[in-house]
Image (cartoon, coloured by chain):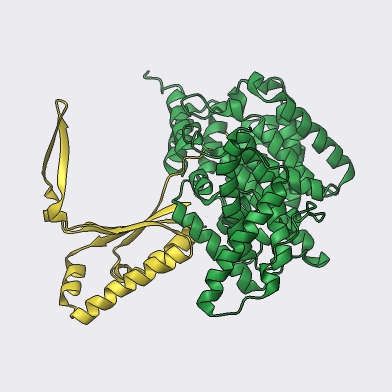
Chain colours: A yellow, B green
Amino acid sequence: MKYLILIYSNPKSREIWEGFSDAQRAEGWAFYAALTEDLAVSGELIVSEALADPSLAKRVSVRDGRAMSSDGPFAEVKEHLAGFFLLECESFDRALEHAARVPEASLGLVEVRPVLDLGGPDM
Amino acid sequence: MSTATEVEGLLRDLAPQVLGALVRHYGGFDTCEDAVQEALLAAAVQWPTDGVPANPTGWLITVASRRRIELWRNETARRRREETAAALAPPDPEPVPAVDDTLTLLLLCCHPALTPVSQVALTLRAVGGLSTAEIARAFLVPEATVAQRISRAKQRIKASGADFRMPPQAERSERIAAVLRVLYLIFNEGYTASSGSALLRVELTTEAIRLTRQLRGRLPGDGEVAGLLALMLLTDARRPARTRPDGALVPLAEQDRRQWDAWAIAEGVTLITETLASAPIGPYQLQAAIAAVHDEAARAEDTDWRQILGLYELLHIIAPGPMVTLNRIVAVAMVHGPQAGLRQLAVAEADPALAGHHRVDAVRAHLLDIAGDQEAARAHYRLAARRTLSVPERRYLESRAAQVAPPSRA
C-alpha cells in the first residue's frame, strides 16, 4: 500500500527553524537526509520532495475555456504544506512509524494519508 | 527465427535452471543472480534476431558465468583479493543440469528474513526471470524502488546465513507455506488490477499460475499447492467478465458467465475434486472448492449457497479471518435470508479487525438492499465508498448507492 506523509509548516515551526544556529539547521538537514536514505535503502521510498515557499505559488483558474493564473492567496495562509514523502509500506502502522521520525511530528504538523489503489477486489 | 514473445517465454522457463547451475557451482547467490539477469537481458535482445542457440541453457550459463567473473573481478579488485582458479572456470554447460533447483530457489527467495514485498520482487526476478523494469511496471512503483528491494533482499539473505539448499524437513512445510503466500500475492496483484493499466503490465496472474504449476511439478503430493493452483485457475477464469471495457467492476452475480474461461474452470474443478479426495484439507483447497461451486453455476441464481456456506463454516474453523467472517455472513444471508445475515453482521462487527472496515458497510448495504430497506442501504453504500482504499471499488459502491431506488417523495 502507498501512503503519503504530509509535512506542514506553521508560524511556530518557522520561528523555531529561523531561531536555529547554522549548525542546528545543518543538523536538521542531515536528519532529513538520513531519513530519506533509510527509506530508500528499505525499498519503501517512492519519492520525497520539499516545496518552495507558498509565496511562489500560483492559482490556476479556467474561465470560458481560458486558463488564467494569479498569485495564490496561499501566502496569507498560516499553515501550509511544506513537503511530502510518498512511501510504499506493508501497513499503516509502518507508515506511521516513519512519519513519527519527521521532526515536525513533535509539533503535530505531520499527517499520513493512505493512497487509493487502482486494483479492485471481487464483488 | 522466433518471436520476442516466444523467446521471452523460453527465457523465463530457463531462468531458474541457469541460476541454480551457477549458484551450485560458484556459491554467492547475490552475484550469480545479477549475472543471470544480465545474461537473460542479452538473450532477450539477441535471440529474436539471431535465432535461439542450439543449446539455450548452455548459452545462458556461459554468458552468465562470464558476466559473473566480471562482476566478481570488480568486487575483488575493490577488496584487493587474489583470484582463484575455481572461481574462474565456468560450470560445464553440457548436459543441462540434472538437478532441478526451482524449488530450492523459490524457498530461498521467500526466506522468512525478507518482507513480503521483497519476497515478491526477488521471486519474480530470480525464479520468474522478469526484469526489474517489468516488475516495477507491474507494481506501479519506480524501477529504483524495485532494484533497491531486490538488492536489500539479497543482502538480508546473505546476512541471515541462508544456504542454497533445501531447508531441513522440520522447517519445510512452513517454508512452503511462505512460498504459497508469495505466489498468491503475485496472483492477486495481477487479478485485482483494473483493466486500464493492465495494458502496460506483465500478466502477473499468468506468471503466478506458471510458477505455481512449476511448484506443483516439484511437489505433486502437496494438497495445498494443488489447492492454490486450482484456486488461481478458478478465479482467473472469471477475469474476462469481471470488468467492463471502461474498467468498472462487475459483481459476480451480474457477470456474463459465457465469457468465463471454460477450459480453466474444467482444469480447476478436476484438480480440486481429486485433491479434496486424497490430501489433508487446507485453506487454499477450501477456497478453491468455494470458487468451483460459483464457477459451476450456469446462472447466478443456480449457485449452491448451502454448499458454499458449509465450506465457509469449515474455513472459519481451520483458517479464521475477517474476510472469511464477512463472506460466510453473505452465504448465511443467501441461505437463511438477509435478516439472519444482518444479525450475524452486528455480532461480527465487535471484532476489532472488522470495526470500521468498509467491507462491513458494503455487506450491510447489500443485505439491507435485499431486505428492501433502501434508504439505509444507500447510506451504507455511501459510507463504504468513502472508506474503501480501492478506486474501482469506490466507483462500484458509489454506483450501487445511486442505483438504490430514491426515497419516495410522498
The image quadrant of residue B115 is: bottom right
Residue B399 higher or lower than A38, as above or below:
above
Estimate the x, y position of residue B393 in percent, counting from the top left: 49, 36
- Is B318 placed left or right of A14 in the picture? right
What residue lies at 68% left-to-right and 50% top-to-bottom? B59
Residue A12 higher or lower than B18, as above or below:
below
Estimate the x, y position of residue B284 in percent, counting from the top left: 73, 45
What residue lies at 76% left-to-right and 59% top-to-bottom? B92
Using the rendered image of the protein, determine whether residue A27 is visible from the camera's viewpoint.
yes
- Is B78 placed left or right of B313 in the picture? left
In the foreground, B320 or B178: B178
Estimate the x, y position of residue B143 in percent, counting from the top left: 46, 52
Estimate the x, y position of residue B225 in percent, counting from the top left: 77, 47
Residue A93 higher or lower than B6, as above or below:
below
Q: Quadrant of the C terminus of chain B?
A: top left
- Is B277 placed left or right of B58 in the picture? right
The image quadrant of residue B332 is: top right
In the foreground, B260 or A107: B260
- Is A34 placed left or right of B125 in the picture? left
In the foreground, B197 or A95: B197
Quick one: which residue is furthest to the right in this view? B278
What residue lies at 45% left-to-right and 56% top-to-bottom? B144
- Total numbered labels placed on residues in the image: 0
What residue lies at 72% left-to-right and 30% top-to-bottom? B264
Q: Quadrant of the N terminus of chain B?
A: top right
